[in-house]
Amino acid sequence: MSEELHDVSVVVNGLPRTARVPARRLLSDFLRHDVGLTGTHVGCEHGVCGACTVLVDSRPVRSCLLFAVGVDGAAITTIEGCTLPDGELGAVQQAFMECHGLQCGFCTPGFVTTITAFLDEQPDPSAEEAREAIAGNLCRCTGYQNIVAAVLRAAQIQREITGQAVAER
């Protein structure tokens, strides 16, 4: 007896994607295996580490904890969708590079998506707000100082892109 399959239709990084999947297919597996976007990493498989974080309707979620059928109709942004429209590095990715915010890179996709959502809500964070924003993501390689610096630098880059005035801190 074969498992019943369900149609899942989502928009991933601006492109419509549809697949027939079992009801218990995790969103992380859907993205990696059915959609072919392998930038989303699966670390702990318990929602603790944050490596699998993607944006669902602009909100950060742990894709290892959600079934793909549960996000049918949603807009999903993965690390691959955090670039600029021309394919260049997005502000958060650029800041990670400039500030040496990654080492092995395994946790980086989750940090980038988390920080992207955070900066949409808080475009001029303090260092303490940046630390709080990344508190749910784990990295075993860094001491987080460069990641915090990358959050602050990404905010600056985004303000420069949008022409917003820089607030004095």
Image (cartoon, rainbow, N blue to C red):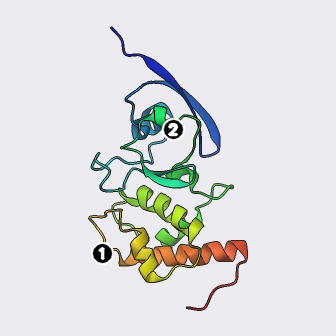
Residue farthest right in this picture: 163
What amino acid is at disc 1?
Answer: Gly
Q: Nearest the camera: 4 or 33? A: 4
The mark closer to the camera, 1 or 2, is 2
What amino acid is at disc 2?
Answer: Val
Along the horizontal axis of the image, is 161 left or right of 89? right
What's the mark number on residue 143?
A: 1
Q: Nearest the camera: 144 or 25? A: 25
Position in image of residue 63 (x %, y %): 41, 45
User: Which of the image's four quarters has the N terminus?
Assistant: top left
Q: Is residue 42 above or below residue 116?
A: above
Position in image of residue 92 (x %, y %): 53, 66
Dot 1 or dot 2: first in sequence order is 2
Identify the residue at horizontal 53%, vertical 50% (top origin). 80
Q: Where, by quadrant of the figure, is residue 166 drawn? A: bottom right
Identify the residue at horizontal 59%, vertical 74% (top origin). 123
Position in image of residue 24 (x %, y %): 37, 29
